[in-house]
Image: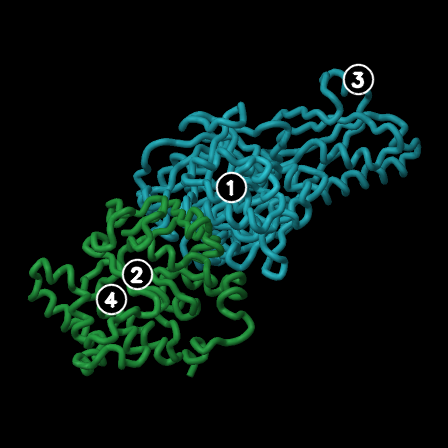
């Protein structure tokens, strides 16, 4: 069994609950004092942070949503003055505004600890060579993983824009022992490998750690048998927190939650009452140690459930399932959270007058998520001239890439094609 | 060892503590830091039973102690070294120390008491040299040592130290802090209140930061020392205090 900070990972439950209560109370005291958004919301509810006497009392507090993050763009939810912020991370978010997260030096250190726990539980040690292959949309996580692996003392190849073939060559030549990527990209690598003369036996790989997407058991088995390695997964909401706030241990039976840094609730469909253990619902997270960007009851949009019982690995940190789905309209594409309205806005912006109808078609190609936008031909956006038309489409693709960090293709379709799906414009045809 | 949950305390209508939770593990040195009036001393006085009107849970070694009388709390294994020493000035050093073992004296632990006296004299050789001297004539540092020694004579498991550096010269502060570190090695757990945040964070394992009766931050001492809020408010970010200056000499 490998631990990064065994003392905290094996804290007895009574002590852990005391630590959670202390940290929750001081977090609430800080946000009430420093973040007008929270003060306003607490006051409106008549909630006094001095009245929270148990961790369970948190259900009395309001949720924080992605809309709240958008409305407080850029620094409205920061609880520290900018002079104390040492890093500003921005990601696309799911609203018109990007999500901006600040970190103090202490926050970066805490994130490094949490990420190192995830990696150490997956078997990463200081002699490992760790290769990180993630889409640009997950670049914040790429940095967190790099720092976590460096904490352990491993040699890290950070994210880069290499093609899959080059990544594979690097994996072979540099003797990568741990690959960190998404489940679908790992599967895609197997596909690409077949077209090369790289043999799995020539690889030094011992583990693949996957993040960003749901890990299906079939995918795990396929990866494990193809490479003769172990596959482990971690969980985090990609826009605001680290990649391994919950992580699998050697038992591969649920994900241990770093409960000394995050409070995890599962909220039922009526979105108020907490779900019973084992019942699926939306994952709601509260930060317990974040100084610069504390979040109270953040609705992740991810679905999962808590698991009961203890784990033979001796970690006392409670466990959750992997992600079983998502709420509402938010899509996870290659690990990146996307709201269809984001694409809608870009198309509207480029249309003169009435904007064309469109559908978002999601499918898999060699295990990778692909996005194709089916755009209705009409003359508000399109010119008869091919050259102009191509320029418009290229422009649209670039704007979407810039906004979401995802490559998309655009197909022009007749009105009937859109009609046959009986969906409103902006609807999603998910064939993954 | 000590678990405090949701502690509230009032002075008249003024709220001195607002929902304070903290804990101390066996063998730890834990610091409470914060400005004047933040509630640090109130926490100690509530734990030791001097303030009894508070609300909340205080458990020591699994047993509820809130509401017990101060002497019962001393008997349970908690001794307090009060702010400003409060030694018995007209009495001798030895008499002061013996008074610290008052509860045990009644229980006829005479032999154990005399061996503890030896232990205290070993910790503070100066007190041995001056055991017959009238306590009021000791220097400030010696009086602080006597106050700590007196508390130790009750053979506490947990020592509550209130502003041990108050009014002392920098070199003496360093002496006292070294002694507190030594105490931990001999098995005494320490919860300490200090205005001199740098001195106390230097020797402690963890700390809690209080503001107007509320805990606003907690963590390992080294993290707090590097925390920008703490630096600005309590460590004097832009100048070296005497404590750090002395360390470097």
- Residue B1 in the image, given as x and y percentages of width and height: 27, 52
Q: Earlier in the sequence, mark 1 or mark 3?
A: 1
Q: CA distance from mark 4 to mark 3?
A: 82 Å
Q: Quadrant of the C terminus of chain B?
A: bottom left
> What residue sits right under mark 3 in the picture?
A416
- Residue A306 in the image, given as x and y percentages of width and height: 42, 32
- Image: A210 above or below B132: above
- Residue A51 in the image, given as x and y percentages of width and height: 46, 41
> What residue sits right under mark 4 in the picture?
B185
> What residue sits right under mark 1 in the picture?
A48
> What residue sits right under mark 2 in the picture?
B160
Please tell me which residue is depicted at 26% across the width and 71% down the height of the picture.
B87
- Residue A235 in the image, given as x and y percentages of width and height: 49, 40
Judging from the image, what secondary structure is the residue with disc 3 in?
helix
Q: CA distance from mark 3 to mark 2?
A: 80 Å
The hue used for chain B is green
Using the image, tell me which numbered label, if any, was put on residue A391.
none
């Amino acid at each position: 069994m490998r631990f990064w900070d065994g003392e905290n990972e094996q804290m007895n439950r009574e002590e852990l609950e005391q630590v959670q209560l202390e940290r929750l109370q001081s977090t609430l005291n800080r946000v009430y004092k420093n973040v007008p958004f929270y003060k306003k919301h607490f006051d409106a509810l008549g909630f006094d942070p001095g009245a929270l006497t148990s961790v369970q009392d948190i259900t009395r507090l309001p949720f924080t949503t992605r809309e709240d993050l958008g409305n407080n763009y850029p620094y409205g939810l920061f609880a520290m003055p900018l002079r104390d912020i040492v890093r500003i991370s921005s990601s696309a978010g799911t609203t018109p505004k990007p999500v901006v997260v600040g970190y103090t030096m202490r926050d970066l250190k805490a994130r490094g600890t949490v990420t190192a726990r995830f990696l150490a539980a997956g078997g990463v040690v200081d002699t490992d060579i760790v290769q990180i292959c993630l889409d640009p949309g997950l670049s914040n996580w790429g940095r967190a993983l790099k720092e976590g692996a460096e904490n352990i003392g491993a040699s890290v190849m950070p994210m880069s824009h290499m093609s899959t073939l080059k990544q594979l060559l690097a994996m072979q030549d540099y003797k990568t022992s741990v690959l960190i990527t998404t489940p679908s990209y790992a599967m895609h690598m197997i596909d690409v490998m077949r077209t090369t003369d790289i043999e799995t036996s020539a690889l030094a790989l011992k583990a693949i750690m996957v993040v960003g997407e749901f890990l299906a058991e079939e995918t795990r088995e396929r990866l494990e048998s193809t490479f003769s390695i172990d596959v482990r997964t971690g969980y985090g909401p990609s826009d605001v927190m680290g990649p391994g706030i919950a992580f699998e241990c050697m038992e591969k039976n649920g994900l241990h939650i770093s409960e000394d840094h995050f409070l995890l609730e599962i909220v039922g469909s009526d979105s108020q009452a907490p779900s019973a253990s084992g019942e699926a619902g939306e994952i709601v997270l509260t930060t317990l140690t974040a100084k610069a960007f504390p979040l109270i009851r953040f609705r992740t949009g991810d679905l999962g459930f808590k698991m009961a019982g203890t784990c033979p690995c001796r970690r006392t940190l409670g466990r959750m399932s992997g992600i079983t789905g998502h709420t509402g309209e938010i899509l996870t594409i290659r690990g990146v959270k996307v709201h269809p309205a984001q694409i809608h806005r870009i198309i509207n912006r480029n249309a003169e007058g009435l904007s064309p109808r469109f559908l978002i078609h999601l499918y898999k190609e060699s295990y990778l998520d692909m996005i194709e936008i089916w755009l209705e031909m009409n003359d508000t956006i399109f010119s008869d001239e091919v050259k102009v038309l191509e320029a418009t489409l290229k422009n649209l693709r670039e704007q979407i890439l810039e906004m979401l960090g995802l490559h998309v293709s655009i197909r022009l379709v007749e009105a009937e094609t859109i009609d046959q799906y009986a969906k409103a414009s902006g609807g999603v045809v998910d064939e993954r | 060892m000590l678990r405090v949950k949701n502690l509230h305390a009032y002075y008249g209508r003024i709220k001195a503590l607002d929902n304070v939770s903290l804990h101390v593990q066996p063998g730890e040195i834990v610091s409470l830091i914060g400005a004047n009036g933040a509630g640090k001393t109130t926490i100690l006085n509530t734990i030791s039973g001097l303030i009894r009107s508070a609300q909340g849970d205080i458990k020591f070694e699994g047993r509820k102690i809130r509401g017990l009388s101060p002497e019962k709390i001393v008997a349970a294994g908690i001794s307090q070294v009060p702010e400003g020493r409060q030694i018995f000035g007209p009495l001798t050093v030895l008499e002061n120390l013996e008074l610290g073992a008052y509860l045990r004296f009644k229980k006829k632990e005479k032999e154990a008491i005399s061996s503890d006296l030896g232990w205290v004299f070993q910790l503070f050789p100066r007190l041995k040299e001056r055991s017959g001297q009238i306590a009021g004539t000791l220097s400030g540092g010696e009086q602080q040592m006597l106050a700590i020694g007196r508390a130790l004579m009750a053979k506490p498991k947990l020592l509550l130290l209130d502003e041990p550096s108050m009014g002392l010269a920098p070199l003496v502060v360093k002496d006292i802090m070294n002694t507190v570190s030594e105490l931990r090695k001999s098995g005494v757990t320490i919860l300490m209140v200090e205005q001199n945040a740098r001195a106390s964070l230097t020797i402690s394992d963890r700390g809690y930061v209080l503001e107007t009766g509320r805990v606003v931050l907690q963590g390992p001492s080294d993290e707090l020392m590097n925390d920008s809020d703490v630096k600005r408010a309590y460590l004097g970010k832009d100048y070296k205090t005497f404590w750090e200056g002395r360390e470097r000499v």
